[in-house]
C-alpha cells in the first residue's frame, strides 16, 4: 500500500498533531533507532523526551552560547582561517559535531582528528534508517558496520564520559559535591532520570549516538544551505553583509528563511494506530501510512505567497506561522533541538535583541562569524550539489576568506 501524501501547509500542521499516528520514518532500521526518542510512542516517549528537554533551559542556552560554543567554533575555524578558506561540507560537519558533542556530554581531547572520528562513526549510523531497502550481502555488511560503529562509539566515547559522570553523581549523592558541580548535558540528565537498572545499557548508548546524529547532521546540512542562500543574496545586495554581521535579528530572519526552504528532514512519515479522519478529508485506515511533505508544505503559496519558492528573508507572515515553517516538525515528535539550532524568535519590535536577552542558536553564531571573516565562494572551484534526493546535499562547497570582504565592527553583545 502506498503512503497517503499531504503537501498543504495547514493540513500537514494539523496532521502532525494527531495523537494516534505512530512514527514510521525509520521502520527499515532494526537495530539503531527503534528505542530512541524519535521512534517511541505514548508514555515512554513523553518520559524520555522530557528528560532530554530538561537540560535545555534558558540558563543552559546562555551558558553554551556565551562560553562553550565560541571555544568550539574557534577551534574548528582555526585550520580554515590559517588556510584562507576550506570546504563548507567538511567545516559544517566538524563544527556541528563538536558543538553537539558538548551538549550530549561526550568528553574529548578536542582535536580535529578526534572530531572527524566521531563524525565518521555517526555518519555510519546515519545509514541505518535506509537499510531496509537493501538486499543480500550489502545489507549484512552494513549491519556489521553499524554494530561496529556502535561498539566503537561506546568503548571510546560513551563509556569514559559516563564513568566520569557517574563518579560525580555519586559524590553529589554522598554530600561531597554540589549539584552545581554536575555537568549540564544530556548524558548526565539521562543517568539521573533513569538510575541503574531502569534502562538498558545498550539503549543508553544508542540514545547518546542518536542525539548527535539528530543534532549535528541536520544542523550541518541547514548551515550549508544557509550560507549558500546568503552568499547568493549578497551577490545581489553586497551592502547587506555588514548589516547581517551587526544586526542579529536581521541575520536570524535570513537563517529562518533558509531553514524554511531547506528542511533537513523533509518528510514526516506515520502509521495510523486506528481509523483516522485526516485534515484533508481522507480516511486513513488503521495500519496505513501517511507521509507529510514538509518541504512542499513550506512552499505552499497560500501561506507563504506567490514567491513561496524563493529566498526572501523579508517576507511578512501571519503571527501564527513561524518563519521556519514546519521544518522542525510539530506535535509530539517536534524537534527538541530547535532552540539550539535556530534560537528564540526575536520579538518583532526588536526589544529582546536590544536588551541582549535573545538566544540566536548555533547556525546564527557560525554564519555570523563566517560572514565577518569575509567568507565568499571559491571562484576557482564551484560548489557541487547532489540533486538526486529530496534533501539538498552538497558534495562539495569550497570557500575562501576574502580580506576585502571582512567586517571588522565590534562584536554584538550576546
Ligand atoms: C536546523 C536543524 C534541525 C532541523 C531542521 C531539525 C528537524 C527535526 C524534525 C523535522 C524533527 C521531527 C521528526 C518527525 O516528526 O518525525 C526533529 C526531531 C528531533 N530533533 Fe531535530 N532538527 C534540527 C536540529 C536538532 C538539534 C540541534 C537537535 C539536538 C541537539 C535535534 C534533536 C532532535 C530530536 C532528539 C528529535 C526527536 C524528537 C521526538 O521524537 O520527540 N534536532 N528534528
Image (spheres, helix red, strand yellow):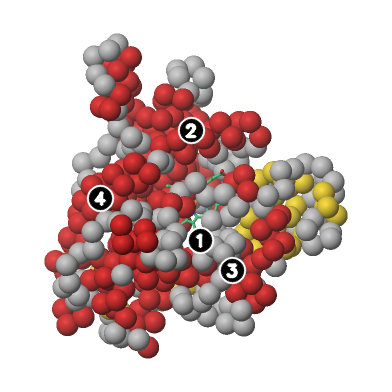
- Please tell me the numbered disc located at residue 159: none
Total labels: the figure holds 4
Q: Earlier in the sequence, mark 3 or mark 2?
A: 2
Mark 4 or mark 1: which is in front? 4
**Residue 245 higher or lower than 290, as above or below:** below
Q: Which residue is mark 3?
A: 318
Around disc 4, counting alpha carbons within 10 Å, would you say few (fewer than 14), some (14 to 19), or many (20 or more)? some
Mark 3 or mark 2: which is in front? 3
Q: Which residue is mark 1?
A: 264
Q: Earlier in the sequence, mark 4 or mark 1?
A: 4
Around disc 1, counting alpha carbons within 10 Å, would you say few (fewer than 14), some (14 to 19), or many (20 or more)? many
Residue 395 in sight: no
Q: Tell me how far mark 3 sits from mark 1, CA to CA.
A: 24 Å
Quarter of the picture containing the N terminus is bottom right
Q: Tell me how far mark 3 sits from mark 2, CA to CA.
A: 33 Å
Residue at 30%, 24% in the rendered image = 179
Q: Tell me how far mark 3 sits from mark 4, CA to CA.
A: 32 Å
Q: Which quarter of the figure has residue 86?
A: bottom left
Mark 1 residue CB less than 8 A from any atom of ligand 1? yes
Per the image, label 4 sits on a secondary structure element best described as: helix
Residue 335: x and y, percent? 52, 50
In the rendered structure, the answer to whether residue 222 lies left or right of residue 296 reads left
In the rendered structure, the answer to whether residue 161 lies left or right of residue 126 reads left
Mark 2 or mark 4: which is in front? 4
Q: Which residue is mark 2?
A: 51
- Please tell me the numbered disc located at residue 66: 4
Per the image, label 1 sits on a secondary structure element best described as: loop
In the rendered structure, the answer to whether residue 409 lies left or right of residue 224 reads left
Q: Earlier in the sequence, mark 2 or mark 4?
A: 2
Quarter of the picture containing the C terminus is bottom left
Q: Earlier in the sequence, mark 3 or mark 4?
A: 4
**Residue 241 higher or lower than 182, as above or below:** below
Amino acid at each position: 500500500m502506498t503512503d497517503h501524501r499531504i503537501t498543504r501547509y495547514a493540513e500537514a500542521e494539523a496532521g502532525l498533531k494527531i495523537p494516534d499516528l505512530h512514527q514510521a520514518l525509520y521502520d527499515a532500521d532494526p537495530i539503531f533507532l527503534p528505542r530512541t526518542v524519535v521512534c517511541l510512542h505514548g508514555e515512554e516517549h513523553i518520559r524520555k523526551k522530557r528528560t532530554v528537554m530538561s537540560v535545555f533551559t534558558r540558563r543552559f542556552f546562555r551558558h553554551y552560547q556565551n562560553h562553550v560554543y565560541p571555544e568550539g567554533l574557534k577551534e574548528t575555524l582555526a585550520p580554515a582561517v590559517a588556510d584562507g578558506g576550506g570546504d563548507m561540507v567538511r567545516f559544517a560537519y566538524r563544527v556541528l559535531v563538536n558543538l553537539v558533542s558538548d551538549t550530549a556530554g561526550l568528553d574529548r581531547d578536542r582535536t580535529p582528528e578526534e572530531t572527524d572520528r566521531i563524525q565518521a562513526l555517526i555518519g555510519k549510523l546515519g545509514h541505518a534508517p535506509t537499510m531496509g531497502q537493501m538486499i543480500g550481502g550489502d545489507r549484512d555488511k552494513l549491519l556489521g558496520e553499524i554494530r561496529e560503529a556502535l561498539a566503537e562509539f561506546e568503548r571510546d566515547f560513551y563509556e569514559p564520559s559516563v564513568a566520569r559522570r557517574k563518579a560525580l553523581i555519586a559524590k553529589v549523592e554522598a554530600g561531597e559535591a554540589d549539584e552545581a558541580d554536575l555537568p549540564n548535558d544530556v548524558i548526565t540528565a539521562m543517568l539521573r532520570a533513569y538510575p541503574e537498572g531502569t534502562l538498558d545499557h545498550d539503549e543508553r548508548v544508542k540514545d547518546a549516538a542518536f542525539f548527535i546524529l539528530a543534532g549535528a547532521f541536520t544542523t550541518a546540512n541547514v548551515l550549508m544551505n544557509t550560507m549558500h542562500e546568503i552568499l547568493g543574496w549578497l551577490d545581489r545586495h553586497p551592502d547587506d553583509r555588514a548589516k547581517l554581521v551587526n544586526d542579529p535579528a536581521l541575520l536570524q530572519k535570513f537563517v529562518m528563511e533558509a531553514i524554511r526552504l531547506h528542511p533537513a528532514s523533509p518528510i514526516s512519515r506515520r502509521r495510523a494506530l486506528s481509523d483516522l479522519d485526516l485534515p484533508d478529508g481522507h480516511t486513513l485506515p488503521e495500519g496505513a501510512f501517511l507521509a507529510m511533505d514538509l518541504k512542499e508544505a513550506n512552499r505552499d503559496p497560500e501561506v507563504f505567497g506567490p514567491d513561496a519558492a524563493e529566498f526572501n528573508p523579508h517576507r511578512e507572515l501571519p503571527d501564527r506561522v513561524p518563519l521556519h515553517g514546519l521544518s522542525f516538525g510539530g506535535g509530539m515528535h517536534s524537534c527538541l533541538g530547535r532552540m539550539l539550532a535556530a534560537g528564540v524568535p526575536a520579538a518583532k519590535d526588536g526589544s529582546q535583541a536590544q536588551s541582549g536577552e535573545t538566544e540566536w542558536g548555533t547556525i546564527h553564531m557560525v554564519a555570523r562569524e563566517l560572514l565577518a571573516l569575509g567568507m565568499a565562494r571559491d571562484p576557482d572551484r564551484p560548489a557541487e550539489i547532489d540533486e538526486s534526493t529530496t534533501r539538498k546535499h552538497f558534495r562539495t562547497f569550497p570557500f575562501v576568506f576574502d580580506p576585502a570582504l571582512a567586517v571588522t565592527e565590534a562584536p554584538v553583545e550576546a
